[in-house]
Image: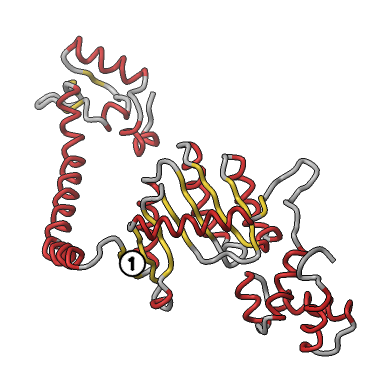
Amino acid sequence: MCTEADSPGMLEREVCAAGLDFYRRALAQGSGSGDPPACLVALGLLRPVAGAPGSLAPVPPDVAAAALARPVERAILDQQHALAAIHASLTGVTQVYRESQEQGDGSVRLIVGKDAISAALENAVQSCREELLTAQPGGGRAAELLAEALPRDLALGERGVRQRTLYQHTVRTHGPTLAYIEQVSAAGAELRTLNEVFDRMIVCDRKIAFIPDHRHERDGAALAVEHPGIIGFLVTTFEHAWARAEPVVYEPTHQRPQLLTNETRRAVLSLMVGGYTDDAIAGRLGISSRTVATHIKKTAEALGSRSRAQLAYLVARSGMLEGEH
């Protein structure tokens, strides 16, 4: 028999066997008496009989259901009114926005604010049906961002969406990013790495692309691009970088993908020869300034250099920027 302890979740449960028996007898006799199961009371299937203390009359299920549904329907109606009020309050602004877009080029829209950008991205990715291209510079990604992206990217794989992502070589030593890569790779996603990734970019079905707007970098801004010519240019840029990139492959004999230390060192030295500072090199390659300094120090020791200028000269003459040394 049901107990009072069961009642908080009663609306999500069926009537118990004892309740069905009690309700059946009450229907046959016209009323019931004694201690009824709590489920019948919670669902409003019994009510006191006027002038007959202790006697309970059975209530038809449709009548009980209507009584239970009334507050739920009222809450839904309130939500519908609130939703209608939101749309009504934005009607004037929407018209102004549409007029502005019609006067300008509506194929490129500015989105300001992290929340607005996230909402726009989420909507576009949810609508993606064939292909998702992503470029993610800056090295390893934050664990909370990876946790947010993982369910969405796995769902894309289940829908048959082809996913290709470019990272920088430094993610090959970043635990959280590697854990994410391993899971999405198992779901069919393809991932490759380069020393330098041109910039952050997301392209959905080659119909809409999101790129950063560095003019508003402090406020967090992105451009939503739907112009076919611009999207074609972005996809071509991605394809050229993809062709040069190294696949991230998990092999049975290796717990992690192959590291590309020599290639990263050549990139550091190439930028150093070009006159970049350690901080500038670190920013372009998605590594720390300390790692840049380590690469330069080890090369200086190997070549016997005593100054940065001399090292740049020796590196340029050595030929180590052209191949493995």
Q: Is residue 172 left or right of residue 102?
A: right
Foreground residue, 11 or 309? Answer: 309
Q: Which residue carries the number 1 mark?
A: 111
Residue 304: x and y in percent read 90, 83
Q: Identify the residue shown where x is 66% and y is 71%.
A: 287
Please identify the quadrant where the C terminus is shown. Answer: bottom right
Q: Secondary structure at mark 1?
A: strand
Relative vertical location of residue 195 with respect to residue 313 in this rendering, above or below: above
Give the x, y percent position of residue 204.
Answer: 41, 50
Towards the viewer: 157 or 39: 157
Q: Examine the rendered structure and indicate whether residue 164 appears above or below residue 307.
A: above
Front residue of this view, candidates 77 and 87: 87
- Which residue, as the protein is rendered here, is positioned at the far top? 28
Residue at 32%, 68% in the rendered image:
110
Is residue 97 toward the left or the right of residue 51 in the image? right
For the point 49% across and 56% down, which residue is it?
236
| Vertical comparison of 313 with 239: above or below | below
- State how many labels appear: 1
Estimate how packed mark 1 is, as few (under 14), some (14 to 19) or many (20 or more) residues with alpha carbons within 10 Å: many
Q: Residue at x 20, y 13 (%)?
A: 27
Disc 1 marks which amino acid?
A: Ile
Picture quarter containing residue 1?
top left
Residue 259 falls in image quadrant: bottom right
Horizontal and vertical percent for residue 253?
A: 80, 43
Is 46 on the left-hand or right-hand side of 307? left
Position of residue 148 measured from the top left corner of the image (x, y, whole percent): 49, 54
Coloring scheme of the render? secondary structure
